[in-house]
Image (cartoon, grey):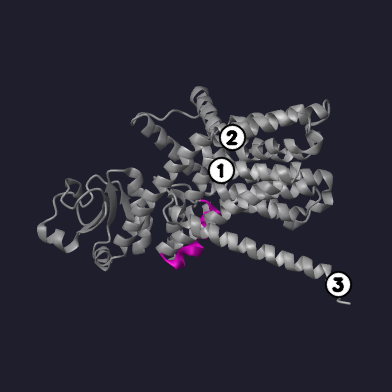
Amino acid sequence: MAPLPDPSARATALKLLAAALAALAACVLLAALIPWIYPGEDARFALAWGDELGRLHVPDFDGPVPAKHPLTLLVGLLLAPLGAGAAIVAYGAISIASFALTGYAIFRLGEALGGATAGGIAAAIALTRPAVLEQLLTAGKDLPFAALVLLAAALVVADRNVSPNRVLVLLLLAGLLRPEAWLLAIAYWLWRHREAPASVLSPTTICLALGAPLIWAGLDLALTGDPIQTLHHGQGRAEELAQLHLGGGAAPSASRSGPALERLANGLDAGIPGAVGWGVVAGALITLAIAAARVRGRPLYSLGPLVIPLAIAAAAIAVSILAVVAGLALPARFLLLGALALVAVAASATRRRHRSRAAWVALIVAVAGTAAMVPADARDVRSMVTERETTSELGDKVLALGDRPRVEAAIAACPSLAAGGRDRGKVSLGQTLAALASGRDVSDFELGRSQLLRRRGSAFAYELGPEHPAFGRDLEPEERARTAQRKGPWTFASRC
């Protein structure tokens, strides 16, 4: 008689097959998406600053530049040895991994809240939102941030006695990208201390809970001499944007209740319903109302697992309020995490104990609302893909221009650098990528100078020829022939 197959060996073989299929799917996803991804401003500056730190230069974090974030700065430093082109591709690969991790995390959270069906619905809704796809295509930091927090939430919902260090490590990493995770880490530590004090009193656990803000402040202090430079920089950027919006007039004070409330209302509307749709928001509210009716008269934590995503959404809104009060800008992407948490809440209406007429209404409202947005979402995605294609083409051209030996030699002879042109966003693109290609510091560039070659130096210009008056004065024919280089809409010229 033939021996019976070993069940454990069969299970191992199935796991290996699943892992191989997952790896194959990841490779297909990487190959399919990488051509569409091109890092946005935050990611480009992280790469450029990482390159500067790798050359033992301290970057200039003031002026019209994005805020620095410790984790993206570390990624930029680690990718710097790859060179400009390869580092951009690697950053795109990290964005794809973050997208996949976000899908996995929200599936796990939805599964823990309402079963596998809820997890599948939550992942399908989340991964098709234009706000999520925009973060994917621009390699934005808000996508890995959301993935880390949602994964931590899934661990807690699935097992409230999970090792606190596992949860706090994820929140620590998330806290090096955005400050909402600071509140969540401290709130989680306090909750676990209330439930089981001995589990969170070790020095390691306390350090994990408080580590992110301390690391951020320490990095600010080490690099700029100001432990809250990121906050001060954000306030300055908000004032600059307000002045641009008003056409150069005085910036509105964030302390005035009218403008502040208006900014908060607009930010919340664009950040939550604008990201996932009013159908999902309504479905989440109905689901919460059903759960609240079941625990009427009892404390909020009696809502059970729904408290976790509710706390995430509340933390996102609380930080948004604090940002407005502090005079900071409030982009819609700051609320992406809270919006995704509500997606999981809406999908949890499939939970067996919630299966009632009202629960089905909540689920139908969420799914139908999402389906109704498909035409508009498709237009948004097409627009984003077209914009990414254009940006990628422009970026490749300025990288190629900065890599030319004649350009490198001219910069070495004329080290004073400038960047300018017809479009401020495109000029910023050229500035960071030209710095990466030529191995120079981003802060070496004088950005947006009205006369690029006013005296001596080298300049990268967008949609300006070397004969344009913006070069200070027309280049002499021999100077033009000797130094002027073109690549698409980009021009490089030098005068020494």
Q: In which quarter of the image is residue 476?
A: bottom left
What amino acid type is highlighted by mark number 2? Answer: Thr
Front label number (2 vs 3): 3
- Position above or below: 268 against 439: above
Front label number (1 vs 3): 3
Quadrant of the image containing the N terminus: bottom right
Q: In this view, does 195 lie to the left or right of 238?
A: right
- Image marks 2 and 1: residues in contact by CB distance under 8 Å: yes
Decide whether residue 478 is among the magenta residues.
Answer: no
- Position above or below: 90 against 430: below
What amino acid type is highlighted by mark number 3? Answer: Leu
Magenta-colored segment: predominant secondary structure? helix
Residue drawn at point x = 53 percent, y = 23 percent: 257
Q: Name the residue under label 3.
A: 4
Q: What is the secondary structure assignment of the residue under circle 1?
A: loop
Q: Residue 358 carries which label?
A: none
The picture places residue 335, in percent across and down from the top left corner, at 57, 38
Q: Name the residue under label 1.
A: 128
Distance CA(mark 1)–CA(mark 3): 46 Å
- Lower position in the chain sequence, tag 2 or tag 1: 1
Q: For residue 86, say whether it is visible.
A: yes
- Image marks 1 and 3: residues in contact by CB distance under 8 Å: no
Distance CA(mark 2)–CA(mark 1): 10 Å
- Lower position in the chain sequence, tag 1 or tag 3: 3
Which residue, as the protein is rendered here, is positioned at the far right?
Answer: 1
Give the magenta-colored segment's residue range.
69-83
Q: In this view, does 171 lie to the left or right of 31?
A: right
Residue drawn at point x = 73 percent, y = 46 percent: 116
Q: For residue 74, say whether it is visible.
A: no
The picture places residue 145, in percent across and down from the top left corner, at 59, 49
